[in-house]
Structure formats: structure tokens, C-alpha cells
Image (cartoon, rainbow, N blue to C red):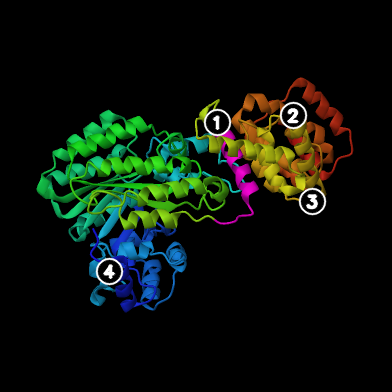
Amino acid sequence: MTTLSADETDKKLRETSDSFCAAKWSQVLFNLQVGQRHNCCLGGPQTIDPDLIKKDLKYLFNDSVLIDERKAMLEGKKIAGCNVCWSAEAKGHHSDRHFKSSAEWSAPFFDKEKQTLDDVIPTYVEVSFGNKCQMMCTYCSPSNSSSLAKESKKFGSYRLSQDHNWLDTNLENMFLDENENHIYAKAFWDWFLLNHKTFQVMRFTGGEPLISKWMDKFLDWLKTNSMGHADLAFNSNLGVPVELMEKFIQKLKLIPREHYKSLQFFTSLDGWGSGGELARYGLKLNIFEKNLNLLFDSFPSSLFRFTATLNVFAFPDIKRLFEKVYEYKQKSEYQDQVAIVSYPIFYPSFLALDWTKEIFEKYYLETLEYIDSHMAGDKNEYGFHGFEREYFEKAVNFKDDKTKNERLVDIFMYLIQFKFRKNIKELVCPDDIKHMYQAGHDILMNAKFEDFEPSIWAKVEPWIEDEAKQRQIRDYVFSTMITGEYNLWAILGVHLDYIGYNLNEEWIKRWFSHQKTRLGGFELINRLCQKDHNKYEPVLRSNILRYLPYMEDYLAVIVAKLINYHKLNWSQEEDAAMVLLSEKELSGKQTVLLNSIINR
């Protein structure tokens, strides 16, 4: 609910400062599974210091980072983390700064007495306890999807010009939202019990919150404790089994109605069709609609919000999504019960719309025309509102972009790896996406090597079906490593990521074939041995014996450690080869290494 129009809000904001945003005081999103906080959904993450919150729970929302940002806003300074809003306003649009500040839950912070720097208690609290989720959305990350985390652990990140879905193994244990002693989740729960009477909105997100243990804990708590002053909001991908949705609805119905002010349901959906299902992999629109209807029928007076993250894969289906939203608007009991807001995507960059004007402008204009012809008015009480149109218009930012070829290559690279990981033979998606996929492939096949960095070619090489082209790529990449034109460790990083599922074994021979790359060869075979000891131990042993006479001292020391680590079992033939080696002239380190093997 809003209390002011965007223009009225702008005037009121300026009474405090030209950069003031009430959301810096009123709103917070906690991603507890990674120990981070977003003060705004459009801003970057801020790390929560575990030592500080052990001292005082107030530091969840009042550490030095937030205090400095609040102070800067009161002084009229623009904060870098708010660049999405500054960019929108520079183009003449109202930004989320206006929409969030005009909300009922932000209104108290227009009062200068409330604009303190410390001991602020937010009124709009959104929380994710864990990354447990059954879906693998294209633009999501392992920290927000357990399914993506599992896939990334098996295959590594998607190797693109800007690698995507990298798994931080240091945070992996924190992802488990079933952990009752999770440091951040426990701290939040204690903070919630102290401050919940101040909240005007309590919102749960994920992961998928409907499959979180902490969601059950909250619903059980709410049976006997009241938050009658607050709206309860639930994010859901609505892709969970229908039986699980029915169970959630039954638990919600057991909560006394006076224990909450209202119910709000938020769902993300980027297009209604195969592109929308591709962008949010794991989503089945028939299941989505069944679950949406269950909620709509069970809680007919509740608020429903669609969030569309406008992206390349789903944009061909965007008009159909607005048509579907309009269908639900016609079932509404009151104005604004059903609405859709749209946001741009910036990462991964190949999914952003900025470079797609020639391809997608027709969908943008068609959708805008549809919105305009179905606006709310006297004859169409439950149509689209100005804020829905404005959100859509400002989220589409076409521009002449010189990186089109790189983006198309990334689309090809993403989708071909996507097919491999999901064991899919044929893509089910809009024709535009299939054309982009083919265009990316054709660009690579016809490109000159100097058109892309060697690391890009190293990432591409395993996915090219033309064997002659693959050999040419290997020759080119290896030559840049030998001549020093390119950092060989960057190439090694690519090959290490492909270990175990898509590394051409010819690369092993190449890494060992030159003195400059031999250290990388031993690291490669070391990691291969960790994946499949029985298969690669003989390869490690043979390369040690073959190159021992040529090893520099530092490499001999490293290889000695590898021998101890892998507990190599030498054959009689290899023992005989060692005797012959001992008769050669070797350096001190080489001799020590050989003797350590002989006298094992």
C-alpha cells in the first residue's frame, strides 16, 4: 500500500535531501544462508559480521556500513549501491526510491526524529533462511538454490566470457537451512522475537520458503503468538508439488485470523511459455497455475504480486505473461489485488536486454500496446495501473551495443553446457532463442582466433563438434601459452574446471610436452587422480619417470609431495626404469626425489 503519489514522494524526499531514501531505514532483506543483508532488492549484498551480532543483535541492521550510508543520504550524497535508482531517475523515470519511500511502511521515516543513524528497527523485513530450492533459474546462484549448488559442485561454474554459477565451497555448510544452530538464522530468530512488534511487513523468501524447516517453525509460532499489526508475505516459485502447496495452505488456515493483518503472495515469473520455463528451469506452468489457483481460491482477499525479471530467454513470452496477469486481475475482489512489476537483469550479461533491440523491440512494443489498451479506468476497474506500465517501460533499456557477438557466443556456450548438465538432447524454447544459439555457434566457427581471448577459446573447445576446428583451437591456445602471449594459469583454470566430464585427454600430453607448462601438467594429473585414482595413477607415475631428469628443483619438490599424497604403487618395470635413471647425471633435487621413490 502507498500513501503518496510518486511526484508527491519526490517532493517530500527532497525536504530531507536530494538523495534521501526512506528504505535505508525501513527495509531489509536477510540472506542468512550466506551471512549477507540487502538493504534493498536492487542494491548489492552487505556482509553481516558474526562477531558483532554475538555482541549485540542490533548490528544485524545497525552496523557501520549502514550507519555511514544513512549519514551520507542525510547529507545529500549519492551512494554507489543505489546506482539502479540514480540511473532510472537520470532518464526521467521515477525509481524504486520513490516507490519504496511512498509505501505505508516507509512513512514513519519521513519524520526527522525517526531518521537516527543507530538503533534503527526496520518496518519491512524479508528473510531467507536457506538456499533449499527445487528449481535452477538461469540467473540465480548456488547461494540461493540448493539444486544449483549440487549441480555446480558436480560440474563447476558455467564457463562463459563471464563465468556463471560459481560455488563458494567455503559457504557450502551455511546453505543448510535445516541446521538449528545456524549462526545467522539463530541470531535472526532471536532478533525477530525482540523486535517483531515493530514490523509492518514480515516476508519470507528463499530458496523456496515452502520447503524450508524454518518456515514451519514460524507458522507454528504464529499459532500462539500474534502479529496482528503486520502483513504476512510469502515468496514462492509456485513450482512445488501441489500436495505441498495444499499442506502449506492447511497450516496457514490453522493460524487465527487476528494473528496477522493481511496475507500477501509474491511469485516470480518472466514469461508465459517455453522461454519462461527455460529461464526458470524446473518450472512447469501447469503446476504453477494449479498452485496459484489454490492460493487464489483459499485466500480470495489476499494480495498477489508477480515479479518479472526481464531476460533474453523469456522475453518472447512477455506479452502472454501480461495477458495471464490480466486474467487474474479480472478475478480480483478489489483494485490492486493483482499486479505485476518488472525489473531489468544485469548479470549474467548475456541475459540482459540492452543488446537485443533488433530482435526484441517488437515484443516490447506489442506488450506496451497491450498494457495501454488494458489500463484501469471507469470501464475497466481491474486493468493495469500506471506503476505497472512504468516498471515495464523502465526495465527495458535497449541500446546500440557492440558486444552483440560476445553475447551470442555466451548464449551458445551457456545453452550447450545447459543441455549437457541436464542431459537434454533438444532445447524446448522460443524460435528466437534457437536462432541465437545457432548464431553463437556460427560466430565461433567463422571467427578469427584474434577475435576472442585464448581463455575463451579454451572454454569453447570442448563443445565444438568439428574435430578439425577443435585441433586448431588446441594448437592456437597452446602456442599462446608457450610464447607467453597469454597467462597459462588462466588456461589451466579452465581445464581444471572441465576435469571429470569434458576435458579432452590430448591436453594432458600437451601440458607435459613443454618445460613451461609441465608444472600445470602435474597439477592437472594430480586433480584427475583425485577424481579417478585407478585410471590416472599410472599416468602420473609414467610422467614422473619420463620427466624426472628434466625437472627444475622447485618441480622436483612439488612432485615429491604428490608421490606422498597419492601413495603411488610402482610396478616392477618402473622399478627397473628407476635403476637406469640412477645411472644418469641428475641434479641434487632430482636425485633426492629418485632416491625417495627407490627407498620407499
Which secondary structure lies at badge 4? loop
The residue where tag 1 is placed is: 419
Q: Can I make out residue 36 in this image?
A: no
- Tally of marks: 4
Look at the picture and state if 182 lies above or below 391.
above
Residue 26 - label: none
Q: Residues within 10 Å of mark 2 (few under 14, many from 20)?
A: few
Segment colored magenta: 399-419
Residue 184 colored in magenta in the image: no
Residue 397 shows up from this direction: yes
Which residue in the rendered view is the most extreme toward the top?
572
Q: Nearer the viewer, residue 94 or 219?
A: 94
Return the disc, 2 or 1, that comes first in the chain's sequence: 1
| Contact (Cβ within 8 Å) of mark 2 with mark 4 | no
For residue 588, what is the image quadrant? top right
What's the residue type where badge 1 is placed? Lys
The residue located at (11%, 46%) in the rendering is 257
The CA distance from mark 4 to mark 1 is 50 Å
Quadrant of the rendering where the N terminus is positioned: bottom left
Label 1 to label 3: alpha-carbon separation? 35 Å
- Residue 407 among magenta residues: yes
Q: Amino acid at mark 4?
A: Asp
Kindly state the secondary structure of the residue where label 1 is placed. helix
Looking at the rendered structure, the secondary structure element under dot 2 is helix
Residue 467 circle label: 2
Question: Marks 3/2: CA distance?
Answer: 26 Å
Q: Residue at x 18, y 41 (%)?
A: 299
Q: Which residue is mark 4?
A: 119
In which quarter of the view is residue 468 placed? top right
Q: Earlier in the sequence, mark 4 or mark 3?
A: 4
Circle 3/circle 2 CB separation < 8 Å: no
The residue tagged 3 is 484
